[in-house]
Image (cartoon, rainbow, N blue to C red):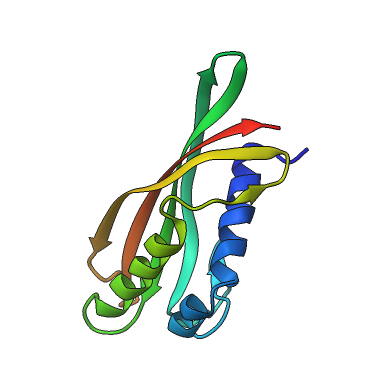
Amino acid sequence: MTGPVSALRKAVRQRLVDDAALLALLGGPRVHDEPPRAAEPPYVTFGPASAAAWNAGAVAGRRHALSLVVWSRQGGDAEALAIAARLEELLDDATLTLEGHRLVLLSVSGLETARPDRAGLRRVTLRLAALTEPL
């Protein structure tokens, strides 16, 4: 069976790459665990994730905190924020099918922008909260 963090990330990625509007903003299915070498922005990467025990009666589930990071090179945050807004539309309160687990809840818990890094890339981090339980 797939672990709950992997199952959740796989389902989130599938939801994103199946969306034509997001792919138009990104210029293709640019959703990565980490950016490929010489990747041209914009693209989305998975950021840190954590899972902790969550119990609902007899069911032992997991409480997840995970993030998606939007990377952009365009001046200002407009491009990255537009992509983050689409991510929020796709994921906040989404119903996703997870391998070996059931998604109880998925919600956007926060968003933050960051100044450009040394390479001049802008980034917006979208924070997600989820609850899963085994099937």
Vertical position of residue 14 compared to residue 23: above or below: above
* Direction from residue 52 to residue 60 in the image, left or right: right
Q: Is residue 6 left or right of residue 56?
A: right
- Is residue 58 rendered to the left or right of residue 53? right
Nearer to us in this view, 94 or 9? 94
In the image, residue 118 lies at what x, y percent? Answer: 31, 72
- Looking at the rendering, in which quadrant would you find the C terminus? top right
Q: Name the image quarter holding residue 125.
A: bottom left
Residue 127 lies, with reference to residue 117, above or below; the image says above
Q: Is 81 positioned to the left or the right of 130 in the image?
A: left
Direction right: furthest residue? 1
Q: Where residue 85 appears, x then y in whole percent?
A: 33, 67
Query: Which quadrant of the figure has residue 100?
Result: top right
User: Considering only vertical position in the picture, is 121 above or below 113?
Assistant: below
Q: Nearer the viewer, residue 127 or 41?
A: 127
The residue that appears at 31% across and 79% down in the rendered structure is: 79
Q: How many marks?
A: 0
Residue in the picture at 47% in, 79% down: 21
Q: Residue furthest top?
A: 58
Q: Could you say where residue 116 lies in the image, as x and y percent from the top left? A: 26, 71
Reply above or below: 88 against 6: below
Residue located at (40% from left, 47% from top)? 107
User: Can residue 107 be seen?
Assistant: yes
Instruction: Name which residue lies at 56% across and 66% down.
Output: 32
Residue 121, can we see it? no
Q: Which quarter of the rendering shows the N terminus?
A: top right
